[in-house]
Image (cartoon, rainbow, N blue to C red):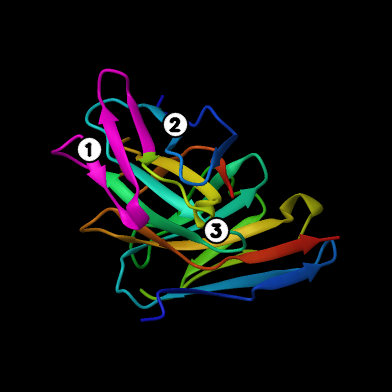
Amino acid sequence: AQSVAQPEDQVNVAEGNPLTVKCTYSVSGNPYLFWYVQYPNRGLQFLLKYITGDNLVKGSYGFEAEFNKSQTSFHLKKPSALVSDSALYFCAVRDIGAGNNRKLIWGLGTSLAVNP
Amino acid sequence: NAGVTQTPKFQVLKTGQSMTLQCAQDMNHNSMYWYRQDPGMGLRLIYYSASEGTTDKGEVPNGYNVSRLNKREFSLRLESAAPSQTSVYFCASWEQATYEQYFGPGTRLTVT
């Protein structure tokens, strides 16, 4: 069965320090992977994706993610965290089951708190 | 472009009441979705519409119905609301070329 796991419910980091939000996946075939961010009382916004090509993907707001096929991971990273990065982050993978090409399988989310 | 819009933003219902959540997108996307978000449970798909004229059940369809009125609009109806349907509801549409989903601002529903 296809799945996405975000092993940490919450990540705390000091402003200016690097941050990592973890995501692992289980799919058959080549994964299409995504990160979305949700700020308080807002809808989700697309951050970045991996479809094919370079394993290091750069996205919005200075975020990047590294696709690691051997570890089936797609961790979100940022070299220097800002207080304004505090939000809920979701990892997702395209559901490649028959007839499901347009659906995503979502992780449960990781709450990132960046402390001043 | 307004993107994905949802109405209402907030709603309080009594058990047994009905209501319709409205969603519209102006990006000419074929696919649209309804999710609910509950603490600790992430996003769960209620229904989706791959294209105008089609709808399919997601993970948690019980207690809901949907209508894809046209390419722009996708509504979610609660026929007899229950406290278990207290949640935040998000509508989304899908950009086929980029595989990106675009979300509305959400509807916060409380059923008492």
Q: 10 Å neighbourhood of mark 3: few (<14), some, or many (≥20)?
A: some
Subunit under mark 3: A
The residue range painted magenta reads A51-76
Q: Pointers 2 and 3 in contact (CB under 8 A)? A: no
- Residue A45 visible (yes or no): yes
On screen, B68 above or below B26?
above
Q: Write down the residue under mark 2.
A: A22
Image quadrant where residue A108 sits? top right
CA separation in Å, label 2 and label 1: 15 Å
Subunit under mark 1: A
Residue A74 among magenta residues? yes
Mark 3 residue type: Tyr
Expressed as whole percent of the image width and height from the top left, the position of residue B2 reads 41, 80
CA separation in Å, label 3 and label 1: 24 Å
Location of the N terminus of chain A (image quadrant): top left
Expressed as whole percent of the image width and height from the top left, the position of residue B52 reads 35, 68
- A8 left or right of B54 in image: right
Q: 10 Å neighbourhood of mark 2: few (<14), some, or many (≥20)?
A: many
- B29 left or right of B110 in image: left
Mark 2 residue type: Lys
User: In the orientation shown, which residue stands out farthest toward the bottom?
Assistant: B1
Expressed as whole percent of the image width and height from the top left, the position of residue A100 reads 34, 43
| For marks 3 and 1 on the same chain, the one whose residue lies earlier in the sequence | 3
Q: Pointers 2 and 1 in contact (CB under 8 A)? A: no
Along the viewing direction, whichever of A13 and A88 lies nearer the viewer: A13
Image quadrant where residue B25 sits? bottom left
Q: Write down the residue under mark 3.
A: A39
Where disc 3 sits, the SS reads: loop
Where disc 2 sits, the SS reads: loop
Q: Is disc 2 in the same subunit as disc 3? A: yes
